[in-house]
Amino acid sequence: MEVPKDQMAFLLENGLYDSAQILGCFLVSSTVTSVDTSPYLKAENLVLQGDALFGDKEFRRSLSMYKQALQLCKIIPKQTTVSKSSLSASTRSSSPNNTNISAINEYEVKFKITLCHCALYENRAALAEIEGIPQKARTLRMNLTIGKLYRISRHNRAAVSCYKDCLRHCPYVLEAITALAELGVSCKEILSLFPQTPNRGRSAYDHSEYTRWLHRYVEAQCCVASSDYKGGLEHFSDLLQRFPNNVHILLEIAKVEAITGRSEEAIMNFEKVRSIDPFVMTYMDEYAMLLNSKSDPSKLNKLVHDLLNIDPARAEAFVALSLLWERKDERRALAYAEKSIRIDDRHILGHITKGRLFLSLNRPDTAVTAFRAAQELRSDLRSYQGLVRSYLALSKLKEALYTAREAMKIMPQSAKALKLVGDVHASNSSGRDKAKKFYESSLRLEPGYLDAALALAELHVVEGKTKDAVSLLQRYIKDCADDSLHTKLAQVFAATNMLPEALSHFQAALRINPQNNSAKKGLERLEKQMKGIDPDAVEEDEENEVEDAEGDPEDTDLL
């Protein structure tokens, strides 16, 4: 043959995909024009060309080559193909870029087609293709891939079976451990999948010491998946002592701290991760959400800039970008949140951010859809909180109470879940006594939970118990210099005409957080009150602006 096939394989082995696919055009062309070329040889050449195109990320063209090769495989006489049962592990490639020019494995070609569909986000087609590979012929990577596809398709029982096969083959497939924990498989059942006998040359004691950390990792993931965040943090902290500066463990700890509201600790751990490895993308949108809640635009802006420079195709970058624009342009922020979901429709924080934005745009019905999408992927307190807020905005108290109770059932040791039930009761005047009990229970469970303290203070104000509200807020301010506490106390003082005290606390809030909009607006109103001006009166300049706008149609058109 005029075109040397071994040179094509050599280019692929060295990752020279551009050169390989150009040479592949000659290779495929020569077999097409030659009448004597066997279908087997044509199929081989098409697979090689498919591998080159896959390496160049031309997935649609690669898919076409593999499918043509598969069609040719079906017409190749049985005697020219290699028996599938006799194929050793060495003849099976685990990637479209690993080729074996001496034999074509039909199942490997089907797997390469699967990977093309996955790269094109055609998950249904990918699942249909990989299901055509018999279970006994599946490699470790095939089992992991089909497990992920079953999970995306919500075939959870089938996904569990595939992930279990992965761990029986190799207990160190940590993705499978996390997936099984999230799918509700118990810690005991996951550990039972691990081989109980030590490897050759390793004593039983050494084997036990070697796998102890892995057992602890399983326990940690199962705790987090079952919302036992305290237990999860304890296990991850033990692992961190054994493996200091482990980026993965630090990220897992930071994620749990972010979910449970331990914002300061989470921020500290995220920053530690970035100091160790500044190019990490995983969970960085969680870090962005914390910076946004802390009103730290400079750090958030730098983080977004860094993420876009590292990998602008990741969902985390667009969630962070959405959070950056949240206070400037909500519609633009919404567009970025939707783009993050288009990149990865299983990215939970993308759906939660989208729901939050719909709520702020006064579209609670659409927000419900976004929060439910997040909830279907994984139970997350923030999606429960979003659903409850949405239902309350829609005056659907029954649905709000059911959702809050579901959160409390799933997370019985969560102060935030208790507070959520209190919020629903507090929305109805007949439920205030129940709300008070839930807020107090939340504070007993987590004494430093400021949102519950603020909600209880608001309940006192609504019931006319101003002294109780002031006493509660002052007690918390002694232990925690938080701008929201000062703002709330200032609002209580302003409502009871204690203007100097209100002024002092508004100023304290703005010293802690200059971006606190509630404190800014409260201070503006208070200054008008102290000058004897009605804060609700429309100023003369504003009236003139309205009259001018109404009187000049051309200006109105321009606006």
Image: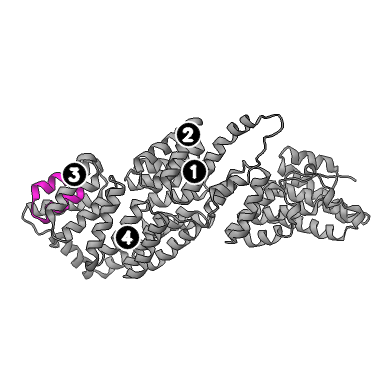
For marks 3 and 2, give the CA distance: 35 Å
Q: Position of residue 288 (x, y in %)?
A: 40, 45
Q: Residue shown at 28%/45% (left/top)? A: 448
> Label 2 near label 4: C-beta < 8 Å?
no
Q: Which residue is mark 1?
A: 220
- Answer with mark 1 or mark 3, whichever residue precedes in sequence: 1
| Residue farthest toward the right in the current orientation of the protein | 36
Question: Which class describes the residues within 10 Å of circle 4: few (<14), some (14-19), or many (20+)?
Answer: many
Q: Position of residue 467 (x, y in %)?
A: 12, 52
Q: Residue shown at 88%/56% (left/top)? A: 39
- Disc number for residue 240: 2
For marks 4 and 1, give the CA distance: 28 Å
Q: Position of residue 541 (x, y in %)?
A: 15, 59
Highlighted range, magenta: 486-507
Q: Position of residue 357 (x, y in %)?
A: 38, 59
Q: Amino acid at mark 3?
A: Arg
Q: Residue shown at 78%/38% (left/top)? A: 10
Q: Which residue is mark 3?
A: 475
Disc 1 on helix, strand or loop? helix
